Amino acid sequence: MENPEANSFQFDEVDHLLRNAELRDQIEPYVDESICRVNVQSLSTAKENEFLASMLAWERAPVLPIQAWFDPPLSIPRPADFCMDLEGADTLHQVLWETIYRLFEKRIVLEFTDHLSDRELYQVIFRDILPSEEKKMEDSQSYLHWDCADATRNPEIYLRYYASDEEREEWEQEYGHPPPERTRAPFLRQLPKKPL
């Protein structure tokens, strides 16, 4: 008597192998050393297919300014359009949070923002994030994480407000002098985050 589960497994495996051949053909023009470094022998065919499909999606994704990821393109007022009085600050705060949630809808997560005032964070979004050209991945489960501390160019901000004790110690050992004094960030926010 035939085992239906065994037959189903065999058909699934054949489908995975056929899909694998199709994906390998499609990704061939993009193959470089980064793809070759992945040990696909350690993956099941189904997992390898997921990897290849994600690589293919990455290669084919258009590079667009983040503001163009929206339909219509996301346009927000210039920071200077908000008065410096209390009413202007309230309006800026409201537009800032609307923009943060709009960005999150496109899977853009803002990180390390607690050292920035609302106006400063708004300026970062207006000046740096919205015009930044990035790969727009359709139907992706991945998130674009935007480092608002700019730790690679300005490690002092990250070290002062966000670094763990271990990171601070590693930095001191590497650079031979103590990191900036740890300070509590002045503008604590509960931003939307990537689900765990």
Image (tube, helix red, strand yellow):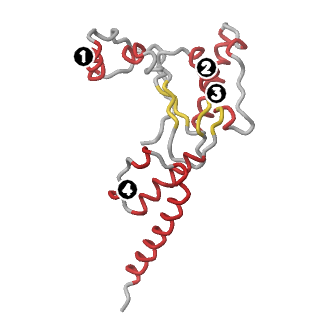
Outermost residue to the right: 72
Separation of disc 2 and disc 1 at Cα?
35 Å
Q: Quadrant of residue 98?
A: top right
Q: CA distance from mark 1 to mark 4?
A: 37 Å
Q: Residue at x 41, y 49 (%)?
A: 36
The amino acid type of the residue labelled 3 equals Leu
Mark seen at residue 40: 4
Total numbered labels placed on residues in the image: 4
Q: Marks 3 and 2: in contact by CB < 8 Å?
A: no
Q: Which residue is mark 1?
A: 173
Q: Nearer the viewer, residue 163 or 128?
A: 128
Q: Quadrant of residue 172?
A: top left
**Corner quadrant of residue 168:** top left
Chain-order first, disc 2 or disc 4 = 4
Residue 7 rendering spot, x and y as whole percentages: 41, 81
Locate the C terminus by quadrant: top left
Task: Report the amino acid beneath label 2.
Answer: Tyr
Which mark is drawn over residue 126?
A: none
What residue sits right under mark 2 in the picture?
122
Label 2–label 1 contact, CB within 8 A? no
Helix, strand or loop under label 1: helix
Quarter of the image containing the N terminus?
A: bottom left
- Provide the residue designation for mark 3: 130
- When the figure is inspected, residue 167 is found, relative to residue 1, above or below; the finding is above
